[in-house]
Each structure stands twice: as structure tokens, then as C-alpha cells.
Image (tube, rainbow, N blue to C red):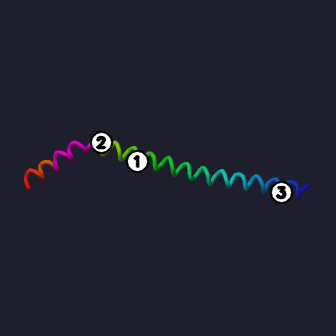
């Protein structure tokens, strides 16, 4: 009986380990997507001021 129990516990442990690996990858993907959204938002908000500064530099040259 204990051999069956040990085998079942080992298979459950392997299953949980594989789920945690996939969960970690999903979390990294979500963090990367959030960083991308923040960067796009920041560039969108600052885009006009950057364009104005570059225009001033171009006019000065």
C-alpha cells in the first residue's frame, strides 16, 4: 500500500512542478506585456514634446 501511495505522491509532485514552470513563464509574459504598454504610453505622451525639441534643434542647425 505504501508503494502505491509513494508512486501517487511522486506523480502529483511532478505534475505540480510542471504547472509551476508554466505559471512562471506566463508571469514573465504578463510582466513583459505590462512594460511594453507602459513604454508605448510614455512615448505617446512625450512624442509631441520630443518632436518639438528635435524641430528646434533642426532649425538651429
* Alpha-carbon span between mark 1 and mark 3: 44 Å
Foreground label between 1 and 3: 1
Q: In the rendered image, which residue does mark 2 sit on?
A: 44
Q: Is residue 4 inside the magenta stretch?
A: no
Local crowd size for mark 3, using a 10 Å CA cut-off: few (<14), some (14–19), many (≥20): few
Q: In the rendered image, which residue does mark 1 sit on?
A: 36
Question: Mark 2 and mark 3 in contact (Cβ < 8 Å)?
Answer: no
Range shown magenta: 45-54
What type of secondary structure mainly makes up the magenta span? helix
Residue at the image point whose x is 8% and y is 56% from the top? 61
- Looking at this view, name the residue that lies furthest to the right: 1
Place of residue 52 in the rendered image (x, y in percent of width and height, measured from the top left): 16, 45
Question: Mark 3 and mark 1 in contact (Cβ < 8 Å)?
Answer: no
Residue at the image point whose x is 70% and y is 52% from the top? 16
Which mark sits nearer the N-terminus, 2 or 1? Answer: 1
- Dot 3 lies on which element? helix
* Alpha-carbon span between mark 2 and mark 1: 12 Å
Q: Quadrant of residue 41?
A: top left
Q: In the rendered image, which residue does mark 3 sit on?
A: 7
Residue at the image point whose x is 51% and y is 49% from the top? 29
Judging depth in this view, the residue of 37 and 4 nearest the camera is 37
Q: Is residue 54 left or right of residue 46?
A: left
Place of residue 47 in the rendered image (x, y in percent of width and height, measured from the top left): 25, 44
- Dot 2 lies on which element? helix
* Alpha-carbon span between mark 3 and mark 2: 56 Å
Which mark sits nearer the N-terminus, 1 or 3? Answer: 3
Foreground label between 3 and 2: 2
Which mark sits nearer the N-terminus, 3 or 2? Answer: 3
Place of residue 5 in the rendered image (x, y in percent of width and height, measured from the top left): 85, 54
Amino acid at each position: 500500500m505504501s508503494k502505491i501511495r509513494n508512486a501517487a505522491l511522486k506523480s502529483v509532485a511532478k505534475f505540480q512542478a510542471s504547472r509551476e514552470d508554466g505559471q512562471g513563464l506566463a508571469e514573465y509574459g504578463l510582466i513583459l506585456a505590462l512594460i511594453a504598454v507602459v513604454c508605448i504610453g510614455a512615448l505617446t505622451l512625450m512624442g509631441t514634446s520630443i518632436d518639438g525639441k528635435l524641430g528646434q534643434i533642426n532649425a538651429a542647425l
